[in-house]
């Protein structure tokens, strides 16, 4: 499938949450929640037209991000080693599905609050989906070549191809197994612990590969 066809298909997929939101239009009040705290309780409200604008904007972000990823080899100023077309395409699809999933969850959260159709353990579902996204990125990370847009972009990895490869192979294992453990922890914890646990876990899983990269640099 050519890049143009891929972008059109991805754009159509991002319309699914928008169409779903429009199907709820007559059931929604004039003001809908647009921001939630860590416990997924709404703390800000705007018009339902404003929310529609947010969803459309997120869809445009998907298309723009995917276009940048698919053309990463031509726009990357580093361009030392070209990324394989398959890696670029898979990455674009991971980003598309992830952001579209976020859009769909926003619509479900709006429906959940405004129409009073609660979804059991919705908090856990959201953070588990986020963990699955990072697991996908973990699998991709070990095959990513040096670039300025995706991966562990520290001064040490960008300056050394060997540091880049070792850091990303290590990060791949950390992100995959770390997020699997995080999913397990979220499933066993009460709902109100899901948000703080996820934030703390992602921060730790991000710091560990960066520190590993620095340690490699120090040894060199």
Image (cartoon, grey):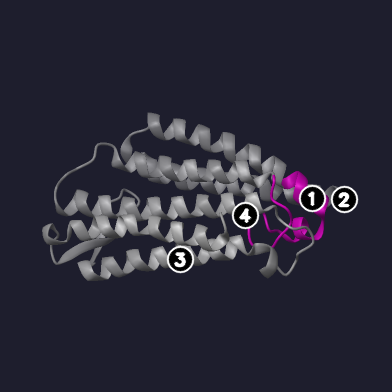
Residue 161 lies in the magenta stretch:
yes
Q: Nearer the viewer, mark 4 or mark 1?
A: 4
Decide: marks 2, 3 in contact (CB < 8 A)? no
Mark 1: few/some/many CA within 10 Å (<14, 14-19, 20+): many
Q: As displayed, is residue 11 above or below residue 214?
A: below
CA gap, disc 2 and disc 1 = 9 Å
**Residue corresponding to mark 1:** 163
Task: Please name the residue shown 60% across and 60% down the image.
Answer: 70
Residue found at the far right of this picture: 220
Earlier-in-chain disc, 2 versus 1 = 1
**Residue corresponding to mark 2:** 220
Secondary structure at badge 2 equals: loop
Q: As displayed, is residue 55 above or below residue 212?
A: below
Q: Where residue 218 sits in the image (x, y, percent)?
A: 82, 51
CA gap, disc 4 and disc 1 = 21 Å
Mark 2: few/some/many CA within 10 Å (<14, 14-19, 20+): few
Q: Where residue 33 sits in the image (x, y, percent)?
A: 23, 60
Relative depth, front residue between 158 and 36: 158
Secondary structure at badge 1 equals: helix
Secondary structure at badge 3 equals: helix
Earlier-in-chain disc, 4 versus 2 = 4
CA gap, disc 4 and disc 2 = 31 Å
Task: Please name the residue shown 49% across and 61% down the image.
Answer: 7
**Residue corresponding to mark 3:** 61
Q: Where residue 62 sits in the image (x, y, percent)?
A: 46, 62
Question: Tag on residue 88?
Answer: 4
* The residue stretch that appears in magenta: 143-167
Decide: marks 1, 3 in contact (CB < 8 A)? no
Based on the displayed image, in which of its 4 quarters is residue 54 positioned?
bottom left
Relative depth, front residue between 196 and 175: 175
CA gap, disc 3 and disc 4 = 17 Å
């Amino acid at each position: 499938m050519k890049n143009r066809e891929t972008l059109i298909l991805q754009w159509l997929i991002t319309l699914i949450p928008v169409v779903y939101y429009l199907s709820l239009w007559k059931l929604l009040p004039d003001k809908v929640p647009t921001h939630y705290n860590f416990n997924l309780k709404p703390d800000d409200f705007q018009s339902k037209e404003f929310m529609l604008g947010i969803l459309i904007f997120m869809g445009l972000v998907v298309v723009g991000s995917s276009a940048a990823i698919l053309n990463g080899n031509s726009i990357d100023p580093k361009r030392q080693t070209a990324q394989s077309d398959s890696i670029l395409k898979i990455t674009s699809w991971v980003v598309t599905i992830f952001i579209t999933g976020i859009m769909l969850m926003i619509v479900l959260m709006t429906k959940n609050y405004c129409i009073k159709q609660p979804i059991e353990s919705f908090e856990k579902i959201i953070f588990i989906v986020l963990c699955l996204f990072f697991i996908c990125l973990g699998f991709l990370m070990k095959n990513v070549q040096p670039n300025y847009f995706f991966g562990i972009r520290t001064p040490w990895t960008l300056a050394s191809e060997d540091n880049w490869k070792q850091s990303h192979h290590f990060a791949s294992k950390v992100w995959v197994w770390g997020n699997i453990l995080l999913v397990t922890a979220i499933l066993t914890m009460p709902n109100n612990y899901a948000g703080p646990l996820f934030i703390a876990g992602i921060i730790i899983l991000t710091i560990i590969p960066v520190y590993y990269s620095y340690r490699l640099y120090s040894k060199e």
